[in-house]
Image (spheres, rainbow, N blue to C red):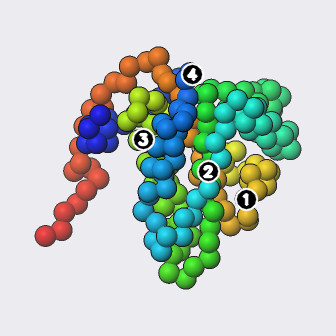
């Protein structure tokens, strides 16, 4: 797949099934994330790859967080199944490092770039994915279970797998609504 075609036609695919990336394909995905813009080479990211038992562990973390939050019985019942919507979930964490010349927001942005790069690498290799956030990404108990420091951020959960659906081409958006040109 050509790079420009990939970037101009990227869509999120919520319906994912096996197979998940593995071996060289998974390594390519992770390496693409590690190539994200990274001021001073702080590597402000940490990724947790969840598959098989790892998905159940992530579901258990979600369930415990939902219980502690006093969520509705339906939400608590649904929580352990959330990671099962794909055969793999990569948890993306901004592992913040104090540095006067690299503010926290820049480190968060760098980690976000890494997530998009990983999704693009997955698509380029024939897989699909969706980047999900939701309240679990902001929940203190989930962060503790992920061994996050107080200043770290979970930027989301990159669900990866194969889709039975054919991606529809994206309709180009009107750049004039979002861009101004200074000359």
Residue that numbered label 1 is attached to: 148
Q: Residue furthest bottom?
A: 100
Of tags 1 and 2, the one toward the viewer is 2
Q: Residue at horizontal 73%, vertical 59%?
A: 148
Q: Position of residue 84 (x, y in %)?
A: 67, 27
Residue 20, visible in the rendered structure? yes
Q: Would you call the spot at circle 1 few (<14 residues within 10 Å), some (14-19), or many (20 or more)?
A: some
Residue that numbered label 4 is attached to: 18
Q: Earlier in the sequence, mark 4 or mark 2?
A: 4
Q: Earlier in the sequence, mark 1 or mark 4?
A: 4
Q: Would you call the spot at circle 3 few (<14 residues within 10 Å), some (14-19), or many (20 or more)?
A: many
Task: Quadrant for residue 44, please give it.
Answer: bottom right
- In space, the residues marked 1 and 3 are separated at their CA atoms by 26 Å
The disc placed on residue 161 is none
Q: Residue at horizontal 63%, vertical 62%?
A: 95
- In space, the residues marked 2 and 3 are separated at their CA atoms by 15 Å
Q: Residue furthest top?
A: 164
In the drawing, does residue 9 fall left or right of residue 65? left
Q: Quadrant of the N terminus?
A: top left
Q: Position of residue 36 (x, y in %)?
A: 44, 58
SS at badge 4: loop
The disc placed on residue 47 is 2
Q: Position of residue 183 (x, y in %)?
A: 13, 70
SS at badge 2: strand
- In space, the residues marked 1 and 2 are separated at their CA atoms by 11 Å
Q: Label 4 near label 1: C-beta < 8 Å? A: no
Residue that numbered label 3 is attached to: 121
Q: Earlier in the sequence, mark 1 or mark 3?
A: 3
């Amino acid at each position: 797949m050509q790079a420009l075609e990939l970037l101009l036609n990227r869509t999120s695919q919520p319906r994912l099934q096996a197979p998940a990336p593995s071996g060289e394909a998974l390594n390519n995905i992770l390496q693409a994330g590690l190539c994200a813009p990274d001021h001073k080479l702080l590597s402000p990211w940490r990724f947790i790859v969840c598959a098989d038992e790892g998905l159940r562990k992530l579901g258990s973390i979600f369930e415990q967080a939902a219980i502690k939050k006093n969520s509705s019985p339906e939400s608590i019942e649904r929580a352990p199944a959330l990671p099962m919507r794909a055969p793999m979930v990569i948890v993306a964490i901004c592992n913040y490092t104090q540095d006067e010349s690299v503010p926290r927001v820049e480190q968060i942005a760098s980690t976000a770039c890494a997530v998009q790069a990983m999704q693009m690498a997955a698509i380029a290799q024939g897989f699909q994915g969706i980047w999900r956030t939701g309240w679990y990404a902001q929940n203190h108990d989930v962060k503790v279970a992920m061994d996050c420091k107080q200043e770290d951020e979970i930027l989301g959960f990159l669900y990866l797998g194969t889709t039975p659906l054919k991606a529809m081409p994206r309709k180009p958006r009107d750049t004039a609504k979002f861009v101004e040109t200074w000359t």
